Structure formats: structure tokens, C-alpha cells
Amino acid sequence: MKRIEDYLPLSQATYYILLSLREVRHGYAIMQDVEEISHGEVTMGPGTLYGALGKLEKQKIIAKADVDEEDRRKYYRLTTFGKEIVQLEYKRLESLVKNASSIIKEMEGDQDDGQEI
């Protein structure tokens, strides 16, 4: 059986899809929200989105949500397992930034000596 860590790291698109599913949404709303929460850094087409949704659903990270039967759109929600994954990925990314912070600041302070490596 796979451990939760086996699902990490997430791709940038997958991470934003999971963040978007903090509430039940249909595909087009997910695409719009991903673009909004990523400040336009991530835009995805239907093929990318629905491919990712299918994979995430198969992995039990997300599930179809029950909504109005008259609405033909498919709605998705984050599972408890999915919430654990996105929270663990957040902590992983936060640790990367924290661990590199002083090194990056040090690099910014270095003067370029003009030599190529």
C-alpha cells in the first residue's frame, strides 16, 4: 500500500487543482480558480484539467460530489486523503523555502565576478 509521501511532490498544476477544491467545484470553475489563486501563473486547458482530475479521482485524492441532478456538469471535492496530501505538500514547500532562505539572501549579496562556471 502506498504511503502518503509516495504522492509527493505534486506538480504545480495538481497542487493548484487541490487548493481549488477547498470547496466543491466543476471543471470550468476549477480552471478559473486555479488561474486566480496562482495570480495568472498557471492556466490550463480542459485536456490538462480533466486528465489530472481523472488521475486524482482514481487515486482517491478527489471524488465526484453529489449536486443537483439536473446540472449536467461533474463536480469534484477533495477527500480527507486529498486534504492530507495538499497539507503535507504545503509543509514540504514551506520547508524548502525556509531551508534555502539564508542561502538565497547570501547569493543575492554576492557580486558577480564575471566568470562563467
Image (tube, rainbow, N blue to C red):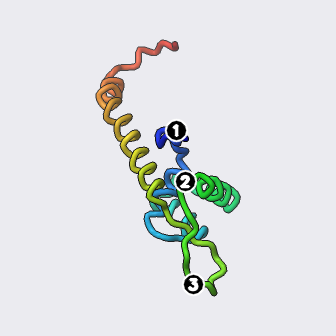
| Image-based side of 80 in relation to 12, left or right | left
Task: Give the residue type at disc 3.
Answer: Asp
Q: Which mark is residue 76?
A: none
Task: Give the residue type at disc 2.
Answer: Val
Q: Residue furthest right?
A: 47
Element on which disc 2 rests: loop
Mark before the other along the chain sequence, 3 or 1: 1
Q: Residues within 10 Å of mark 2 (few under 14, many from 20)?
A: some
Mark before the other along the chain sequence, 3 or 2: 2
The residue depicted at 53 percent of the width and 47 percent of the height is 12
Mark before the other along the chain sequence, 2 or 1: 1
The part of the image, by quadrant, that contains residue 53 is bottom right
Mark-to-mark CA distance, 3 and 2: 30 Å
Element on which disc 1 rests: helix
Could you tell me residue 47's position as x and y percent?
70, 58
**Which marked residue is nearer to the observer: mark 3 or mark 2?**
3
Mark-to-mark CA distance, 3 and 1: 35 Å
Residue at image mark 3: 68
Residue at image mark 1: 6
Q: Residues within 10 Å of mark 1 (few under 14, many from 20)?
A: few
The residue depicted at 64 percent of the width and 53 percent of the height is 55
The residue depicted at 45 percent of the width and 58 percent of the height is 19
Q: Are marks 3 and 1 in contact (CB under 8 Å)?
A: no
